[in-house]
Amino acid sequence: MKNTLKKKAKDFMTKNVVAVKESESIKHLFKLMDKGGILGVPVVDDELHVVGIVTESDLIEHFTTIKAPRSVNLLGGIVYLDNVAEFNEQLKDHCAETVKGLMNKDVITVSESSSLLKIINMMSENKISRLPVVDGKKKLVGIITRSDIVHELAKVKLV
């Protein structure tokens, strides 16, 4: 177990990271996350430096600002009391917004040489589920999620 906790991030991180640029649309981000089955995406600049992160919580919070039109169910049909076209426009505008306005800029990263124990502690202390991994030049090279940690710990013979 002791050796496992000393394992370096570069040895168990996910290397093929799905990342987006600040200028990409939220709609594009949604499609990437849905297609890849991922719940968080690092945001990078043109040199691949991590400038932010977007999680499923950020997306949910973003879309809770949209108010659905009020409606009533009348004789088995829905009658809208508010302007549906206005709601559709609002939803369309939300999907066209860019990642920059949605991302969390206070992203915490770890280096490739960070130990599993350090990563576990960072995630626990900061109540986060994923950490982008950066190289010596602060460029994105991987990501570690709670699932990656569980997989590593599952390899340990505990008895």
Image (spheres, helix red, strand yellow):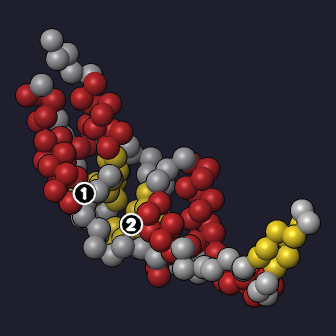
Picture coordinates of residue 144, whole percent (x, y): 32, 47
Single out the residue that lies furthest toward the left: 2
Q: What residue type is labelled 2?
A: Ile
Q: Which residue is drawn at 32% across and 30% down?
A: 151
Mark 2, residue position: 53
Residue 30, disc: none
Estimate how packed mark 2 is, as few (under 14), some (14 to 19) or many (20 or more) residues with alpha carbons within 10 Å.
many
Residue 73 occupies quadrant: bottom right
Question: How far apart are the alpha carbons under marks 2 and 1?
Answer: 14 Å
Q: Height in image: 62 above or below 9? A: below
Q: Residue 127 carries which label?
A: 1
Which one is in front, 134 or 60?
A: 60
> Looking at numbered disc 1 in the image, what kind of residue is underneath it?
Lys
Residue lying at 15% horizontally and 12% vertically, measured from the top left: 159
Give the quarter of the image for residue 7.
Answer: top left
Disc 2 and disc 1 in contact, CB within 8 angstroms: no
* Among the 4 quarters of the image, the one containing residue 131: bottom left
Q: Which of marks 2 and 1 is nearer the N terminus?
A: 2
Foreground residue, 75 or 128?
75
Residue at x 77% of width, y 76% of height = 71
Looking at the image, residue 111 sits to the left or right of residue 38; the answer is left
| Residue shown at 56% from the left, 73% from the top | 63
- Relative to 146, does residue 33 appear above or below in the rendering? below
Nearest the viewer among 54 and 85 is 85
Q: Is residue 21 above or below residue 155?
A: below
67 displayed left or right of 135: right
Q: SS of the residue at dot 1?
A: loop
Question: Quadrant where the N terminus lies?
Answer: top left
Q: Where is residue 55 in the image (x, y as percent from the top left)?
A: 43, 62
